Amino acid sequence: MAEIGKGVTAGKLASNVQKRLTRAQEKVLQKLGKADETRDAAFEEMVANFNKQMTEGTKLQKDLKAYLTAVKTMHDASRRLQDCLAEMYEPDWFGKEEMDAMAEDTDTLWLDYHQNVTDKSLVTIDTYLAQLPDIKARIAKRDRKMVDFDSARHHFASLQKGKKKDEAKIAKPAALLEMAAPSWAQGLISAHQVAQTNLSYNQAEEELGRAQRIFEELNVELQDELPALWDRRVGVYVNTFQSLAGHQEKFHKEMSKLSQNLNDIMTKLEEQRQLNEEANHSESASSAPKAVQRPGPPPSRPPPRLTPSPDQRQQHAGQLEDETSVPDANTESTDTALQAPSWDSWREQDATEPEPERNDDRYPEDAQGGWDYNESRAQSYTQPSWDDVEGQESWSQDGGYAAHSYTEPNWDDDDGANVDQGGWGDDEESAVTNGSDGELPPGFLYKVKAIHDYAATDGDELELKIGDMVLVVAFDNPDEQDDGWLMGVTESSWMQNKDISAKGVFPENFTQKV
């Protein structure tokens, strides 16, 4: 059995070799112009379209695979970028949880997009191109069968042309052979020669018919399939790019939402950073809030300096006149030891007496009014001069005390009136509101805004939040005011309740004057 199988294989190999030699010989003859070639212009155009179609489809498949590779690369780059952002994002920053969820959504979106393009677009192209190699192989087979058909046709034609010549060549020797042979053998020899000639002719004819049948079958099939395949490419391209465009639109739409969310988170994070920066700047500019303590009571304010009234001055002048009109016997000795003080001595004493310092910023109510009269409103007046000739007090040559009359100032004129009218209470009314206006609390001074939170630690303290507006009022007893602390009531509480008992003290450096 093994020998039989080897014999069959050897026979097929010899047959294939013989076919290749015959085809090569036929092509050489066709190129040399010694043999004609079967041509079909319509089929050749179909083959050219098929080759173009296959080239374009292969290029599209290659480019689509490159696009998917780029999508995968972008997915990896986006995932690394999101991981980097998640690692750098502090837990106490705004939107930490949203940022982590956004990274997961972005990764899932890239995976879905890559998978959808692969399944809907690339698979369609692969299926379309999978049938082209079979068509290409059948076209090549048709070309080979066409060469076989041309070879069989040329061989059969050559046999037809040489049949008459062979019959003439065979007839002459056959006639001699028949003459030499016995009469009964002459018929057999003639029949054998005719049979050999007919056998070669019949074999060539059968070979031609078989080659023609195979060629025509392949040719008809390809002529039906190639035009349909050429028209089918349009539908394949439409499905491929419609699917690709749809998935791209969906992907970019979802990605734009994630990008917008990321932008919103970054915007709010920047706002948070600016608020923290402003708070840190305010804390660094002012003293530390935790270090603020209520210091001891401020030093007592000096007593008010009062200007002598006209009645006092007239009383004093009357006393001097009485003394001059009723001299005493012991005046000389007594006045020698003790000299009555004059108004000039009072002025000198007032000039030499140091005036205590006043902090206008610490006691705004004293800066605007209070103990001293308002110098801007008071008009100047002529102070009596006790050193002039008319009002001078002197000693006589004999040691007696002599008093001269003096010109008493007119305290009832406009200048003096202005002094009395510009007293101590007018400026106080300009700085402190007496509460006649129902919209402001009694003793209102000015308004401040809280720039830091303050938690009250005592019952008389006022609790503040950033942005609270506070109406500052004067202390009932100014001696109770501590350095660096103010008294006030929140504007919202006053507008709602109109209750001054809700007032409390608060640190001044936690607020800013409006």
Image: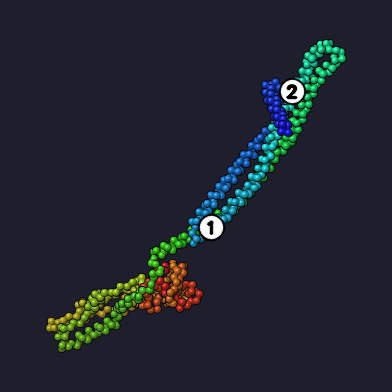
Quadrant where the N terminus lies? top right
Please determine whether, in this image, residue 380 is positioned above or below residue 274. below
In which quadrant of the rendered view does residue 423 lie? bottom left
Q: Is residue 251 visible?
A: no
Q: Which residue is mark 1?
A: 99
Specify the amino acid type for callout 2: His
Please determine whether, in this image, residue 490 is positioned above or below residue 255. below
Q: Position of residue 427 (x, y in %)?
A: 37, 74
Please determine whether, in this image, residue 367 is positioned above or below residue 54. below
Compare residues 294 and 474 and report the one nearer the observer: 294
Q: Residue at x 69, y 39 (%)?
A: 131
Q: Residue at x 52, y 60 (%)?
A: 96
Which of the two discs, 2 and 1, sits closer to the camera? 2
Quadrant where the C terminus lies? bottom left
Q: Position of residue 453 (x, y in %)?
A: 45, 69
Which residue is outermost to the right? 184
Q: Is residue 420 visible?
A: yes
